[in-house]
Image: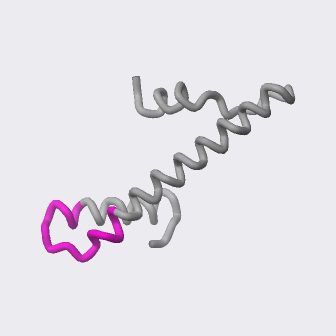
Amino acid sequence: MTNIEIIKKLIGSISPCGQSGVDAERLENLKAMCELINDLVTEIDNVAYMNKDSREHSVKIMAEYSSNFLKNILGIES
């Protein structure tokens, strides 16, 4: 099972179906998914920010990777 499959199984569907009762639950799932994504992006940003000036090669690589991901994939300037 992949990470995304596990998360989807834990949170539940976020796709609306047009039925009020079902969509109310899926809205809560969507809110949970958005909160999780925000928390994950914050974690990645912390790696980029807290280690950007490191002189240790492996730490510097992780900081640069995090920064590049935020900038080039998500379009977030840190």
Which residue is situated farthest in the bottom direction here? 53
62 up-or-down from 15: above or below: below
- Foreground: 67 or 6? 6
13 up-or-down from 54: above or below: above
Helix, strand or loop for the magenta stretch, by majority:
helix
- Foreground: 30 or 63? 30
The segment highlighted magenta reads 47-61
Residue 58 coordinates in the image, percent (x, y): 16, 60
Asked if residue 24 is among those painted magenta in the image, a careful observer would answer no
Q: Quadrant of the C terminus?
A: bottom left
- Where residue 55 sits, quadrant-wise, is bottom left
Residue 72 coordinates in the image, percent (x, y): 45, 62
Left or right, residue 51 beside residue 3: left
Q: Residue at x 20, y 73 (%)?
A: 54
Left or right, residue 20 beside residue 76: right
Q: Quadrant of the N terminus?
A: top left
Residue 23 coordinates in the image, percent (x, y): 79, 31
Colour setting: one colour
Which residue is situated farthest in the left direction here? 56
Q: Residue at x 85, y 26 (%)?
A: 19
Q: Residue at x 53, y 28 (%)?
A: 10
Q: Residue at x 67, y 34 (%)?
A: 14
28 up-or-down from 61: above or below: above
Asked if residue 53 is among those painted magenta in the image, a careful observer would answer yes
